[in-house]
Amino acid sequence: VLEDCKGGSLMFTVSKEIEFDAGHRVPNHNSKCRNPHGHRYRVRVSITGTLVTTPGASNEGMLADFGDLKKIMMELIHDRFDHGTVVWSEDKMFLHALSIDYTEYDEDPWKVIVVPWIPTAENFAKSIWKTLDQSVWDMGFNMELVEVWETPTSLATYKE
């Protein structure tokens, strides 16, 4: 184990980013965001731990394999939200607007993800933390930070 000059184990942080496209609305907002619209969300997850020091291990000298972190982020976050419409469970107007009798059509239903929170960047960040925390823990790491960009210049951060 690598040690610092005081004899303690060195802690490292690594981060991985993914992106997904999704629609939403903020129903109580007093501006244009109350209308349905979409974003290209960018999500960065940061984890902490100590380096692998097992000689000859494929991940020797790493905290985590970026590919392993990307895999759980893609499965649990990207695949859930990408090209879907995220709707708060209490947003009756939007739910009604999206409810279609699909038996009349030869197409699959739209991807509507109903969530128990208003779909703001802040709530996305908290939900992503809650979704990934156990998987990251099972990999042997601690969640450090979740960052969600709703636009290239607008960012929400969550940390417990």
Image: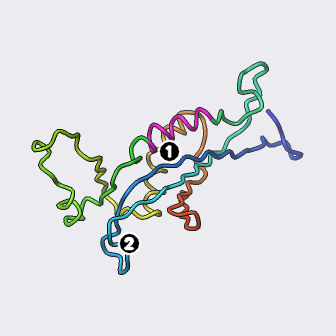
Residue at point 80%, 43% (across, down): 8
Q: Amino acid at mark 2?
A: Cys
Magenta-drawn stretch contains 68: yes
Q: Residues within 10 Å of mark 1 (few under 14, many from 20)?
A: some
Q: Position of residue 7 (x, y in %)?
A: 85, 42
Q: Position of residue 123 (x, y in %)?
A: 43, 61
Q: Position of residue 121 (x, y in %)?
A: 46, 62
Residue at point 55%, 46% (across, down): 18
Q: Which quadrant of the figure contains the N terminus? A: top right
Q: Are marks 2 and 1 in contact (CB under 8 Å)?
A: no
Q: How many marks?
A: 2
Q: Residue furthest bottom?
A: 30
Is 93 placed left or right of 54 in the picture?
Answer: left
Does 124 sit above or below residue 58?
below
Instruction: Judge by depth and name the residue closer to the eye, 151 or 133.
Output: 151
Instruction: Judge by depth and name the residue closer to the eye, 107 or 143.
Output: 107
Q: Which residues are magenta?
A: 67-78
Q: Position of residue 31 (x, y in %)?
A: 37, 79
Q: Which quadrant of the figure contains the C terminus? A: bottom right
The residue tagged 2 is 33
Q: Quadrant of residue 52?
A: top right
Marks 2 and 1 sit apart, C-alpha to C-alpha, by: 29 Å
Does 17 sit above or below residue 122?
above
The label on residue 133 is 1
Q: Quadrant of residue 94?
A: bottom left
N-term mark: 2 or 1: 2
Q: Residues within 10 Å of mark 2 (few under 14, many from 20)?
A: some
Instruction: Judge by depth and name the residue closer to the eye, 98 or 104.
Output: 104
Helix, strand or loop status at disc 1: helix
Q: Main secondary structure of the magenta part?
A: helix
